[in-house]
Amino acid sequence: MKKLLSMLLAIAMLASMSAMAFAEEATSAAEKGTIIYGSTTEVSGDFAPTSWWTNNASDKMLRDLSNDYFVTTSDQGGQYVVNETVVASMDGVVNDDGTKTFTITINEGLVYNNGEPITAKDFLWIPVFECSKVTADLGISSTSYMTYVGGQDYYDGKASVVSGVRLIDDYTLSITIVADKIPYYFDMAYAALGAFDIHYWLGDAVELKDDGEGCYIEGLTKEAVEKQLEYARFNAGEDRVSAGPYNLVAFDKGALQATFVLNENYAGNFEGQKPSVEKIVVVRAEDATWADQIKTGAFNFYDTITDGSHINTALDIVEEGGFDYVTFDRAGYGAMFFQCDFGPTQFTAVRQAVAMLLDRNEFANTFCQGWGGVVNGPYGTGQGEYQAAEEWFEENLNTYDYNPQGAVDLLVADGWIYDETGADWTEGHIRHKKVTAEEAGTYQHNVTLEDGTILMPLIIEWCSSEGNTVSELLNVMLAQGEQTAAAGMKINQNVVTFTELLNYYYRDSSQGDKYAVPTYGVFNLASNFPAAYSPAYEWTLDPDLVALGYNTNFLFDEVLDWLSMTMVYGVSSDDPDTYQILWQQYIKYWNELLPNIPLYSNVYVTMFPDWLEGYEQGSYWGFEKAIVYCTIAE
């Protein structure tokens, strides 16, 4: 017994010492001058040059902190501009055949973080690489081969060069866009080429060349580049090569912590601005304990706070002293994202019924607590397009008000009128619908009667991420709601890590065969829209593009596909009125099909230490851009 007591005492002392050490370490980490950025979105550790494999919000933010030498970029208001730090000159000419050529001269003297010079080659190898079939072999999602003249032939193996991508001299390059992608409302985005080191990313066995007919990558095969690419995308060591305001110098996969230090070789952003904050550490912020974390110094910067109760708590902390904050409307929204090619969610009436079984106004009020509200389409209140169409939307969009009886009427009209035996549905049972073999697919809950009739039960498998406030609220208000059961519907919540959720959402077989199997009918996620928001290809009917990761709703509708393409690929950049009209028509038709249930668009609040001066954030101006302008108070 004495030995046991001694052991317990020793364990208690060690635990106490560990806790004290952790607290001291956290407090030390949050000392003045170092930004400890609390991220609620789990960092995957995939630091690829662009969204080749993953694109969650934290991954993108980390990419942009360390890669910023792009030919064109978006400014504080979300407008595309030429990056004069990178570009000496640029012009765009529409050719007689309808194609458009951008000719770009790069400034001399730019270097990577390791001091190696940057030339025109560094901006061209990614467009050529993305036109190669090798990208598909590597599981990379790209439509670049459809964008550049000669890209399709290069992709198909019919040509040995991409004729529309040219290396003119050491500092001059050109790209030519295919005629059917001109006009394009955001055509400045075509020239948003970034500087990346081909040898760091693909290895020394390959080289970008242009022998006079177009660019190609000599030695490019999956086998030649796969090992180096895998190393480069997950590497956070001193040998990582990048060209942005900060260098990624460490990543702890277990703790989900990334460390950045100032890049002394950075020449500045598009306005020549250089950072002065020397160190940024990105850490995991837990939904349930973030307030305690920030009070104890575990982090001192909490970006884009969404939950209304969290916002109120944050402002209370600010009032106590030591912190400041900014607010801005979100250019994005939170939603329930359906997959529409299997199970009950393939039917529009079911998606609409789910919307009417959820009191979205109450949901938005409960979640946002006055810091946001309901939207009725894929837009955010921070978008200029929405602000210009607000009254029109009020008159033309279905609001799917809370109406359990209306939901039942929709289900009955759509054929959900049977129980599991094929008899007429009665209260207390799950509704079933007679479906064809094609509609039934491999849905796991189907019932086949003795006469061969296939009944599909109104059971929806829902995938949500762990520790998610939105998920918890949806579970109470919808999945476990009495109105849902009374309507004869069952929604099963399945809680997984955020990374695993995305694997199922994208049906990413590269992460395991199970993910490729249609499993969940709905996911709750949020989406922010970039300055050049283009829904083109989001609704593609092309099976090859779907296989590459496009159309993650798996909703195949010709009108939706046409609208989403025409609104951007049928309008020139100097015709905002036509773009606005088509955008509104796209939103209206989307609202009828309801591939997602919009839940809210909110006001964001970001809190930061009061010694950080000059911090300004907006709908299209995130932390990774705003931090470059900040200084440390004396």
Image (cartoon, rainbow, N blue to C red):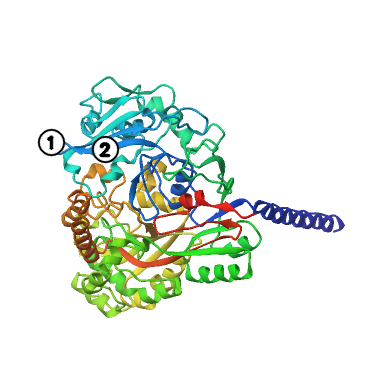
Residue 449 in view in this figure: no
Q: How would you rate the neighbour count of disc 1 (Cα within 10 Å): few for under 14, some for 14-19, many for 20 or more?
A: few
Residue in front for this viewpoint, 556 or 67: 67
**Residue type highlighted by circle 1:** Asp
Query: In the image as oriented, which residue stretches furthest toward the right?
Result: 2
Q: Give the side of residue 196 with respect to residue 608, left or right.
A: left
Q: How would you rate the neighbour count of disc 2 (Cα within 10 Å): few for under 14, some for 14-19, many for 20 or more?
A: few
Q: Residue at point 58% right, 49% down? A: 255
Counting the numbered discs, the total is: 2
- In this rendering, is residue 243 above or below 384? above
- In this rendering, is residue 547 above or below 169? below
The secondary element bearing badge 1 is classed as loop
User: Which quadrant of the structure image shows residue 130?
Assistant: top left
Residue 330 in view in this figure: yes
The secondary element bearing badge 2 is classed as strand
- In this rendering, is residue 263 above or below 479? above
Residue 291 is marked as: none
Picture coordinates of residue 517, whole percent (x, y): 34, 49
Q: Give the side of residue 375 with respect to residue 110, left or right.
A: left
Picture coordinates of residue 303, whole percent (x, y): 50, 58
- In this rendering, is residue 122 above or below 479? above
Q: Give the side of residue 136 with respect to residue 182, left or right.
A: right
Q: Earlier in the sequence, mark 1 or mark 2?
A: 2
Residue 91 is marked as: 2
What residue is disc 1 on? 97
**Residue type highlighted by circle 2:** Asp
User: Which quadrant of the structure image shows residue 598?
Assistant: bottom left
Mark 1 vs mark 2: in front: 2
Query: In the image as oriented, which residue stretches furthest toward the top?
Result: 211
Q: CA distance from mark 1 to mark 2?
A: 18 Å
